């Protein structure tokens, strides 16, 4: 399973007219396709994203345990491919056959939350239960002050760095901030001939550049949803990436290649740093053992705000499901402390509950000295301060597209920074 999830999924391309058609019938017409599972039995339909076959045993055991503890409730598990989830959930909503519990990311789920598709969980989940989850993570699944999702598993970015190349460049420790990154980039290029790192400007692949804006203190939109980034801070963020590119300190492929290419460059020893999730550590160890041997882990890069990003997967429930109570009960069971801890260990992700995150598995220990151990521990240490940096707004993909395409134009010298950022703001504000 590619559990790196969110950088691709965080920018789901919503087809506006298609979505409007599906939902225009109003949320009052949204129902559940779940059927009775025999006399006196309730069946809850549960959709996940591409977790079979790697976690089939885990979910079969999880479901069997839940059914034993909740006589009369049966769970039917349906696993959906990554690429199919968006269209399948939209179609099921339109056809009134939506599952009772579905695994989505908040970015996409919020698009439908704005149309009142999901159950308001504030009415179903007691405050004492909500408080068992990391506060910033629970907040990621809220819209207009209402909770539409229950947090499940998390990932966050780290900095993997090549200690040998850093030493060759005469640098004693990896950069912590983007400002430090720009300072060492020239020195690394001069001393080693390598690039400092790779970051993609392909809109459909990653929101990392957009997140860097927020970390640099840029507000993307105001309270009305209008562009708020055409400011001195926004221009400085644009100028930052334009300067790195024009000085030849970023690979030219940042304009055309995705995050996978960044991993390939790091594995080939062509970049000094790699911004990635802990799940990539095993990939590097397998594909490039010599590089893995000289690699170390540092916290994710940030800006002057010190903000750290996190990607969230949650569970949502259609508000008109006639199995809502059983669905909530099952969603809370999937995401309770023990089950989150078990799944986090199996899937190399992070739990969203406070108690599970405080488990010794995520704490420093003399016995946890492998690269993967260090990645997991540093990832977990970032969680209490981490937050979803990109606001949950309608047409987020259009905002990212406007910023990325105009930033690329400035990098290529086709526009000045002032013109590029003004055009990006205008495109967003005048979107259809």
Image: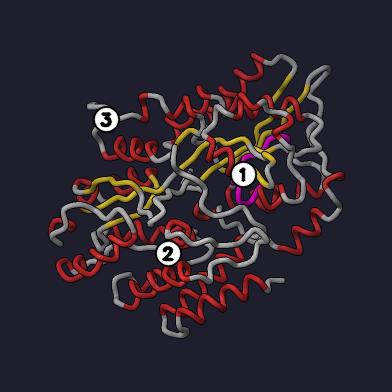
Q: Position of residue 39 (x, y in %)?
A: 83, 17
Q: Is residue 384 visible?
A: yes
**Eyeballing the image, is 64 above or below 191?**
above
Distance from Cα at disc 2 to Cα at disc 3: 32 Å
Q: Secondary structure at mark 1?
A: strand
Distance from Cα at disc 2 to Cα at disc 1: 24 Å
**Eyeballing the image, is 69 above or below 270?**
above
Image quadrant in which you'd find residue 364: top left
For image coordinates 24% across by 46% down, the residue present is 296
Q: Which residue is mark 1?
A: 104
- Where does the magenta region start and end? 99-109
Q: Which residue is mark 2?
A: 200
Which quadrant does the C terminus fall into? bottom right
Q: Position of residue 318 (x, y in %)?
A: 75, 39
Describe residue 113's horizontal placement relative to residue 246 as left or right. Answer: right
For image coordinates 81% across by 37% down, the residue present is 320
Image quadrant in which you'd find residue 166: bottom left
Q: Earlier in the sequence, mark 2 or mark 3?
A: 2
Q: Secondary structure at mark 3?
A: loop
Residue nearer the viewer, 90 or 307? 307
Q: Which residue is mark 3?
A: 368
Describe residue 84's horizontal placement relative to residue 285 as left or right. Answer: right
Q: Secondary structure at mark 2?
A: loop
Q: Position of residue 350 (x, y in %)?
A: 45, 36
Residue 326 belongs to the span the image colors magenta: no
Asked whether disc 2 touches disc 3, contact meaning CB atoms under 8 Å apart, the reply is no
Residue nearer the viewer, 249 or 34? 249
The circle drawn on residue 305 is: none
Residue closest to the far front: 232
Residue nearer the viewer, 180 or 361? 180
For image coordinates 69% across by 30% down, the residue present is 76
Q: Earlier in the sequence, mark 1 or mark 3?
A: 1
């Amino acid at each position: 399973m590619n559990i790196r999830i969110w950088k691709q999924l965080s920018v789901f391309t919503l087809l506006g007219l298609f979505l409007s058609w599906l939902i225009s019938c109003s949320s009052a017409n949204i129902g559940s396709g779940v059927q009775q599972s025999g006399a006196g039995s309730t069946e809850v339909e549960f959709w996940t994203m591409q977790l079979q076959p790697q976690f089939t045993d885990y979910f079969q055991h999880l479901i069997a345990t839940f059914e034993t503890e909740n006589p009369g409730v049966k769970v039917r598990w349906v696993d959906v491919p990554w690429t199919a989830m968006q269209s399948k959930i939209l179609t099921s909503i339109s056809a009134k056959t939506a599952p009772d519990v579905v695994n989505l990311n908040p970015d996409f789920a919020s698009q439908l939350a704005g149309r009142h598709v999901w159950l308001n969980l504030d009415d179903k989940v007691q405050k004492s239960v909500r408080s068992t989850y990391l506060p910033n993570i629970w907040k990621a699944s809220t819209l207009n002050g209402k909770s539409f999702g229950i947090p499940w598993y998390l990932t966050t970015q780290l900095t993997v760095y090549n200690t040998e190349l850093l030493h060759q460049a005469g640098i004693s420790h990896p950069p912590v901030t983007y400002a430090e990154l720009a300072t060492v980039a020239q020195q690394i290029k001069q001393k080693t001939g390598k690039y400092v790192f790779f970051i993609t400007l392909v809109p459909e692949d990653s929101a990392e550049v957009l997140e860097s804006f927020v970390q640099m203190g840029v507000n993307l939109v105001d309270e009305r949803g209008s562009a708020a980034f055409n400011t001195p801070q926004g221009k400085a963020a644009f100028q930052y990436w334009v300067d790195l590119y024009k000085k030849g300190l970023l690979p030219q492929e940042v304009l055309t290649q995705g995050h996978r290419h960044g991993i390939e460059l790091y594995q080939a020893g062509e970049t000094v740093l790699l911004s990635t999730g802990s799940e990539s550590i095993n990939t590097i160890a397998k594909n490039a053992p010599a590089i893995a041997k000289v690699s170390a882990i540092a916290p994710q890069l940030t800006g002057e705000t010190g903000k750290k990003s996190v990607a969230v997967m949650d569970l949502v429930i259609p508000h008109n499901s006639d199995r809502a109570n059983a669905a909530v009960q099952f969603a809370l069971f999937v995401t309770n402390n023990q089950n989150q801890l078990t799944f986090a260990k199996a899937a190399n992700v992070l739990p969203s509950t406070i108690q599970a995150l405080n488990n010794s598995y995520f704490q420093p220990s003399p016995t946890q000295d492998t690269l993967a151990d260090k990645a997991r521990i540093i990832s977990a240490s970032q969680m209490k301060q981490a937050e979803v940096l990109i606001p949950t707004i309608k047409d987020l993909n259009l905002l990212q597209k406007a910023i990325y395409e105009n930033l690329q134009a400035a990098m290529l010298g086709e526009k000045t920074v002032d013109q590029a950022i003004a055009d990006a703001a205008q495109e967003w504000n005048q979107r259809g």
